[in-house]
Amino acid sequence: MHYDLINQRITQRLFNFPYVGPFLSSLSTKVPKAVLDFVVSRQLTSIWGPVPDEAAEKRKAEDIEAMAMLTRFNGGQSISHKTISYLKDR
């Protein structure tokens, strides 16, 4: 894998910085859930291409919500700066 060729989202880039990543992880535990959900949804929506119909749009929304829930499970967003290393491990 050529790490320099990955099209990273802005939050992925920020979480990789030594001081910014832990700060953002800490901050994400303090912002209202609605704000965090909005940011996560925007970031994850950018991964999908156009959807052909309503059913696909519904599946996309369900997938995004499931990923957001997994990230929040047991306060997982507080260690996002540590788990982002999966990009380098690929």
Image (cartoon, rainbow, N blue to C red):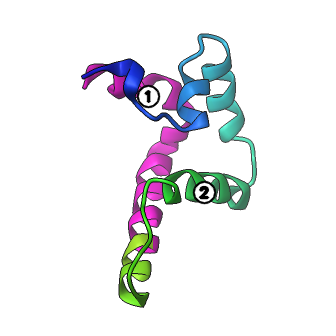
Marking on residue 42 = 2
Q: Is residue 51 left or right of residue 40?
A: left
Instruction: Give the number of marks.
Output: 2
Dividing the picture into quadrants, the one containing residue 23 is: top right
Helix, strand, or loop for circle 2? helix
On the image, the x and y values in percent for residue 17 come to 59, 15
Q: Foreground residue, 57 or 85? A: 57
Q: Give whichever of 85, 7 is nearer the camera.
A: 7
In the image, is 14 to the left or to the right of 46? Answer: right
Category of crowding for the residue at label 1, using alpha-carbon neighbours closer than 10 angstroms: few (below 14), some (14–19), many (at least 20): some
Residue at x-position 53% and y-position 32%: 12
Q: Give above or below for 84 relative to 42.
A: above
Q: Nearer the viewer, residue 16 or 22?
A: 16
Between discs 1 and 2, the one toward the N terminus: 2
Q: What residue sits right under mark 1 in the picture?
A: 84
Q: Quadrant of residue 56?
A: bottom left
Q: Nearer the viewer, mark 1 or mark 2?
A: 2
The residue type indicated by label 1 comes to Ile
Which residue appears at 38% of the width and 66% of the height?
63
Query: The magenta stretch spans which residues?
Result: 61-90
Please state, as top left, top right, bottom left or bottom right, where the C terminus lies in the image. top left
Q: Position of residue 55 (x, y in %)?
A: 36, 87
Q: Which residue, as the protein is rendered here, is positioned at the far bottom?
A: 54
Q: Amino acid at mark 2?
A: Arg
Q: Residue at x 46, y 47 (%)?
A: 71
Question: Which element is circle 1 on?
Answer: loop
Label 2 crowd bin: few (<14), some (14–19), many (20+), radius 10 Å: few
Q: Nearer the viewer, residue 74 or 8?
A: 8
